Image (cartoon, helix red, strand yellow):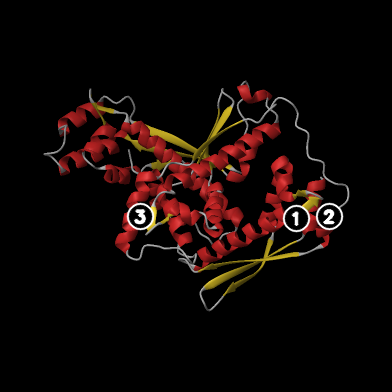
Amino acid sequence: MCRSPMMLLVFLLGTAVYAAEESDRQPAAVVRAATAKAYASLDDQIAQLPLTDALSVGAFVKVMDAQDEFGLELQRSDQLGGPRWIDRNTCQVQLEISTARVTQSLHRIAGARPGRSPVTAAQISRATDQWPQRMISATGCSTSAVALKDLRPHSGNAWSSVNDRARQQALREANTAAVRRAMDSVAPVVLADRQTIGSAFEKPEVGRTVQEWLASRPVTRVDFRDDMQVEVALSVDEREFYDEIRSVVTTVPGLTLPQTPEQWDRVWRDYLGKFHPAVGRAAISADPLTKAVALRIPAAAPEWVNDSINIQGSASVIGSKLKTAFRAETDARAKLRERIESLQLEKGLTMADAARQDLRVADAVSRFVKSARIYKTEYRPDSTVVIHLAADPRDLWEDLRR
């Protein structure tokens, strides 16, 4: 019923603080996603409540073109306690609103447009008096993207006999499909001349950054289906995704972009009409009931184990310096991943190939990239922020040998 539950969330909680370390940012994002999920659930419940035999609250709000106004009422819902952490990565948020408050909001909407309202104030009061509960509550749940591979179906589910490797691979592919769906949906949007968002994605510094941003969004739903497919939904708000795309394309040279606010407004309207939520589905790999044979890690360490790695990432100022530094850090870690994936684990087998064959290798690479140390941050006079990363490949090798 509301145009964007996440927009309500941004109003309530504000923008993430980029000064925090990654470990601090991730829980904040998970809490925001859980809160948005709770708002969406609350909104759905209220939308289905009847005002007449043929008119629901949702239909009434839509007829009155009052989605934003009614959304503001939901923002005043009460949160029951603080965020509840089920484990270190999974959060629950519970919201509650009284039917009296909902009734008052419906009266205000009808009173502000008396000639347009399909119901009278008396009809609204009679209907809401008949609603079965005096309080409406909803719970939202979200988990960190890094914990996706550890999610399991309930016991007794058809997936119970699927081995860990096949399950994790399916989850990973579903996550990738969700990212691709969101990116593909807005790819046709024209920025300027013949430059589309899709053609901008073809530039590695754009496509890679947007893809990693999407893939890191908290997970709000995982459905292990009886047809042996798994569906993953990511917390991707349409406005946040648009802002991410815009902030990235405006920092990359060589792109043809809108030059006026009016032109950007046209892009936004076109984008809104094409955006699809980040939901992806994947099936288990072949022979899922057979224990997978892990990739053999060579006994002898590769030569690169003895080399130190220093990587630089940069970004031009976009908004605050802290946000720009975060963008530069993302660039540096993406370059570090590229460097590692290009290394040979053994003759004829790159780390990228090994990661595709064995999730243990992929996870080890991800851990290594995430743990790389920032040893210097430069705020240059030309408004560029440069992040310097240092990493010891021996740490990766020791992780692979465990």
Measured along the vertical axis of the image, is residue 4 above or below residue 376? above
The image shows a total of numbered marks equal to 3
Which dot marks residue 343? 1
Where does the image place residue 370, in percent across and percent down from the top left? 66, 54
Residue at point 88%, 51% (across, down): 300
Cα gap from disc 3 to disc 2, whole angstroms: 49 Å
Farthest left residue in view: 115
Q: Is residue 91 visible?
A: no
Cα gap from disc 1 to disc 2, whole angstroms: 9 Å
Circle 2 crowding by C-alpha within 10 Å: few under 14, some 14–19, many from 20: some
Measured along the vertical axis of the image, is residue 396 above or below residue 358? below
Looking at this view, is 250 or 75 the one in front? 250
Q: In this view, does 365 lie to the left or right of 122?
A: right
Local secondary structure at mark 3 = helix
Give the residue pinned by disc 3: 267
Circle 1 crowding by C-alpha within 10 Å: few under 14, some 14–19, many from 20: some
Give the residue pinned by disc 2: 302
Name the residue type under label 2: Pro
Where does the image place residue 336, in percent across and percent down from the top left? 67, 59
Local secondary structure at mark 2 = loop
Where does the image place residue 312, in percent across and percent down from the top left? 64, 67
Measured along the vertical axis of the image, is residue 48 above or below residue 315? above
Name the residue type under label 3: Val
Return the disc, 1 or 2, that comes first in the chain's sequence: 2
Circle 3 crowding by C-alpha within 10 Å: few under 14, some 14–19, many from 20: some
